[in-house]
Amino acid sequence: MLKKDLKNIIITALLFALIYFSIGAYLRSDGPKIDLNKVYELIRDSLTLTAYFLAPIAAFIIYNKWKVEHVEKRLEIDSEDIVKAIEENAREVNNLRNLIEDPSIYEAENQSEVGIKFETLDFTAHIIKSRLERLQANTENQQVFIQKGKNIIKLMVESLVLINRLIKINGDPSRRREFNPNAKKLNADLDTLKLEIIELSQLTTSFRIKY
């Protein structure tokens, strides 16, 4: 795109110089006689004026083009990194879900480790949310990406709350009747989470710069 813009600027500059030269030659002509000094002066003035008027315009266009492409490239890299972080966190959430019915997690020596896993995943989810909020959204797709990412983080945190609840329910025989409804809700949320992450990943393809 930048090459195309530069090409248009060069063509415009040449046309401007040609028009100026033609008008100047007509006004300063002495009939059929050619004065090489006047021709030289016209060529020199044409090129000088072209540089004065069009060089700043060219610089402005090139700078703005670079700025837009820089922002787009940053968004492309950041969005892909965010999706990878979300995918990794979602895998860990699923791994934690698989521990619900593991008897070993109810042993005293393992409960501290499980608690640390919850805190780490919750902290990571909020870090990802913070990164989403720092993204610059200039198009509708970018706005959709940010909002969908925030929804995924919200669902992820809610899933962590449900997993923690299910672990407590499973460790308390008097609350067994609460297990199935909560487990059903968790499974539905994790299925939704998986689909939302796939859609989020697909959105990143629209951010790739086309050269």
Image: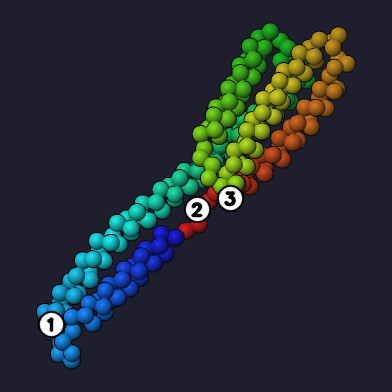
Tags 2 and 3 touching, CB below 8 Å? no
The location of residue 3, given as percent across then percent down, is 40, 63
Alpha-carbon distance for marks 1 and 2? 50 Å
Residue at image point 43% right, 47% down:
70
Apparent side of residue 171 relative to residue 49 in the rendered image (left or right): right
Q: Residues within 10 Å of mark 2 (few under 14, many from 20)?
A: few
Tags 1 and 2 touching, CB below 8 Å? no
Determine which residue is flagged by label 2. 209
Which mark is on residue 36? Answer: 1
The colour scheme used here is rainbow
Determine which residue is flagged by label 3. 205
Residue closest to the far bottom: 32
Residue at image point 64% right, 15% down:
115
Q: Residues within 10 Å of mark 1 (few under 14, many from 20)?
A: few
Q: Nearer the viewer, residue 117 or 184?
A: 184
The answer to whether any part of residue 99 appears in the image is no
Give the residue type at disc 1. Answer: Leu
Instruction: Look at discs 1 and 2 and give the one toward the viewer.
Output: 1
Alpha-carbon distance for marks 2 and 3? 9 Å
Q: Nearer the viewer, residue 100 or 203?
A: 203
Q: Measured along the vertical axis of the image, is residue 145 above or below residue 102?
A: below
Nearest to N terminus: mark 3 or mark 1: 1
Apparent side of residue 114 relative to residue 74 in the rendered image (left or right): right
Question: Which quarter of the figure is the N terminus placed in?
Answer: bottom left
The answer to whether any part of residue 8 appears in the image is yes
Give the residue type at disc 3. Answer: Thr
Q: Which element carries disc 3, helix, strand or loop?
A: helix
Tags 3 and 1 touching, CB below 8 Å? no
Q: Residues within 10 Å of mark 3 (few under 14, many from 20)?
A: few
Give the residue type at disc 2. Answer: Ile
Residue closest to the far right: 177
